[in-house]
Image: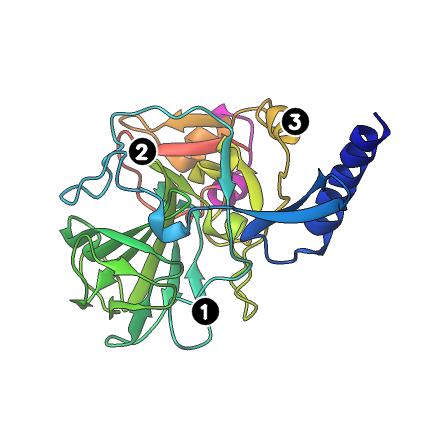
């Protein structure tokens, strides 16, 4: 009986010690004591391999993989908050020089600007910020020559207004790999890279996930995304948004209860002055909130943010 008790204690101790000392968990080694008459305990070691999938082995093409549409999720509705996980702590800068953001994610001239614009010269190389697979590589209305890369956590990055596309759909890329040259194609007012990030069709404020300084840092390995960070109306394209990361499901649930912004849809005959008076706000505040000028023309159906 005491031999059985000794065997159990010895087994558990060996298992714990080996798990602590094994810094590279490719396999688990277990020492099993056995007994033979007149020979005492004999230790036999068995090794169990631990198999984990590499990022390149994850099937990211199983959900809405369409190489002909810029956004294949257009008819789907996502549940919030969204959970994103990263295996890296940094990303590759999409351009080879210091990143200068000329227009940010947010409300711009009465419309949603769903990405950030990074300054470049036509012909500058553009690379993929993370490893992944090219889902879309062709001309898209408004975006010009465009490449969309789906990454192994489901996030997609869009690179628009390129002068040249250097990859094709279904190409596998590593972080920092060349995808094309920057340019001014599509609806563009000068050479720049329009960079968008999205998850299952929901555009996400790029600066919520990534630090666009020289650090090239991913802000957190795990992050929760609420609708505040997927709707441009919460942000001003001329201002840097204050980022407060949500790192737990409980925080995300509370943040999702935040008040929704109040919008106004422009009608025939409306003026900025009349809209501001009817909604008890100053003309300057109305213009600042919507990143427009007091002389900016209005269009019927245009949406203006009244409260954030």
> Element type at marker 3?
helix
Front residue of 267 and 177: 177
Which region is colored magenta?
Answer: 278-289
Q: Which residue is mark 3?
A: 250
Cα separation between marks 3 and 1: 35 Å
Residue 293 lies, in percent from the top left, at 42, 50
The mark found on residue 302 in the picture is 2
Residue extending furthest toward the right: 2
Q: Is residue 9 left or right of residue 84?
A: right
Q: Are marks 2 and 1 in contact (CB under 8 Å)?
A: no
At horizontal 46% and vertical 51% (from top left) the residue drawn is 206
Residue 132 lies, in percent from the top left, at 33, 54
- The quadrant the C terminus occupies is top right
At horizontal 47% and vertical 46% (from top left) the residue drawn is 52
| Dominant SS type (magenta) | helix
At horizontal 36% and vertical 44% (from top left) the residue drawn is 58
| Dot 2 or dot 1, earlier in sequence | 1
């Amino acid at each position: 009986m005491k031999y059985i008790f000794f065997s159990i204690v010895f087994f558990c101790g060996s298992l714990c010690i080996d798990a602590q000392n094994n810094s590279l968990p490719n396999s688990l080694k277990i020492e099993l004591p056995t007994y033979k008459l007149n020979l005492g305990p004999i230790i036999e070691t068995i090794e169990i391999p631990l198999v984990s999938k590499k990022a390149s082995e994850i099937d990211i093409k199983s959900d809405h993989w369409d190489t002909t549409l810029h956004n294949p999720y257009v008819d789907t509705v996502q549940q919030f908050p969204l959970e994103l996980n990263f295996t890296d702590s940094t990303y590759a800068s999409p351009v080879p020089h210091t990143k200068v953001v000329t227009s940010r994610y947010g409300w711009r001239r009465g419309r949603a600007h769903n990405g950030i614009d990074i300054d470049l010269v036509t012909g500058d190389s553009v690379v993929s910020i993370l490893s992944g697979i090219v889902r879309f590589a062709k001309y898209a209305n408004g975006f010009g020559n465009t490449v969309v890369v789906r990454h192994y956590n489901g996030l997609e990055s869009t690179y628009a207004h390129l002068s040249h596309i250097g990859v094709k759909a279904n190409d596998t890329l590593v972080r920092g790999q060349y995808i094309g040259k920057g340019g001014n194609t599509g609806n563009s007012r000068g050479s720049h890279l329009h960079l968008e990030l999205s998850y299952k069709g929901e555009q996400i404020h790029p600066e919520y996930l990534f630090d666009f300084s020289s650090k090239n840092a991913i802000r957190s390995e795990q992050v929760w995304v609420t609708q505040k960070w997927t709707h441009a109306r919460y942000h001003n394209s001329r201002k840097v948004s204050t980022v407060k990361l949500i790192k737990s499901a409980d925080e995300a649930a509370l943040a999702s209860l935040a008040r929704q912004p109040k919008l106004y849809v422009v009608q025939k005959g409306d003026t900025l002055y009349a809209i501001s008076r009817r909604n008890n706000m100053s003309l300057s505040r109305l213009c600042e909130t919507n990143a427009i000028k007091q002389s900016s023309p209005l269009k019927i159906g245009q949406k203006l943010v009244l409260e954030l």
